[in-house]
Amino acid sequence: LRATVVLSEEAVTRRKDELFGKEQLLADPRSVAVRKRLDLPVWRMHREAEILILRSVVGCNLHVDKVTQFSLRPPELRSIFNNIGQYFRWFSCSQVRLSYKQMVKALNRDILKSQWIDAFGCPV
């Protein structure tokens, strides 16, 4: 007997996203992978130095200090806030990290529809 499986386009896209997410998580932290997947402009991507810092603290069970949090702030806020004091005066970082799927929904190519998410994957 031969069975034919017909998948909807939505199901195929969902499966590709799941596989892409798993493969990318091995190579890049979640927030970096999502930004690449959405093909955001360069100025909205994390820099290599930020990714290096992120990789060094992601598996660590220690509390992350404010200087590290500031260095891993959303790229959209990088040029607006160069001062750590001003940044933490106006913004607070959530301790809840978004899942891959939540981040895909929260980030948008249209900056006006996009949420600010730091390199840890936390809403700001």
Image (cartoon, rainbow, N blue to C red):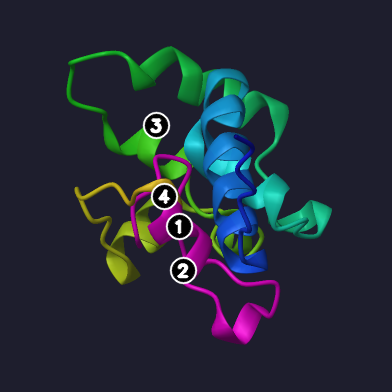
User: Which labelled disc corresponds to residue 84?
Assistant: 4
Q: Quadrant of the N terminus?
A: top right
Q: Earlier in the sequence, mark 4 or mark 1?
A: 4
Location of residue 3 in the rendering, given as x and y in whole percent from the top left corner: 60, 43
Residue sitting at x 47%, y 72%: 115
* Residue 79, above or below 71: below
Part of the protein shown in magenta: 101-124
Label 3: how many Cα within 10 Å (few below 14, some 14–19, many 20+): few
Q: Which residue is mark 2?
A: 106
Q: Which residue is mark 1?
A: 103
The one nearer the camera, 51 or 11, is: 11
Q: Tag 2, which secondary structure?
A: helix
User: Which labelled disc corresponds to residue 68?
Assistant: 3
What is the spatial separation of the Cα atoms under label 2 and label 4, in whole angstroms? Answer: 25 Å
Q: Amino acid at mark 1?
A: Met
Residue 78 at least partly seen = no
State yes or no: discs 2 and 4 in contact (Cβ < 8 Å).
Answer: no
Outermost residue on the front side: it is 1
Q: Amino acid at mark 3?
A: Thr
Residue sitting at x 64%, y 37%: 2
- The quarter holding residue 20 reads top right
What is the spatial separation of the Cα atoms under label 4 and label 1, in whole angstroms? Answer: 25 Å
State yes or no: discs 1 and 3 in contact (Cβ < 8 Å).
Answer: no
Q: Tag 1, which secondary structure?
A: helix
What is the spatial separation of the Cα atoms under label 3 and label 4, in whole angstroms? Answer: 10 Å
What is the spatial separation of the Cα atoms under label 2 and label 1, in whole angstroms? Answer: 5 Å
Label 4: how many Cα within 10 Å (few below 14, some 14–19, many 20+): few
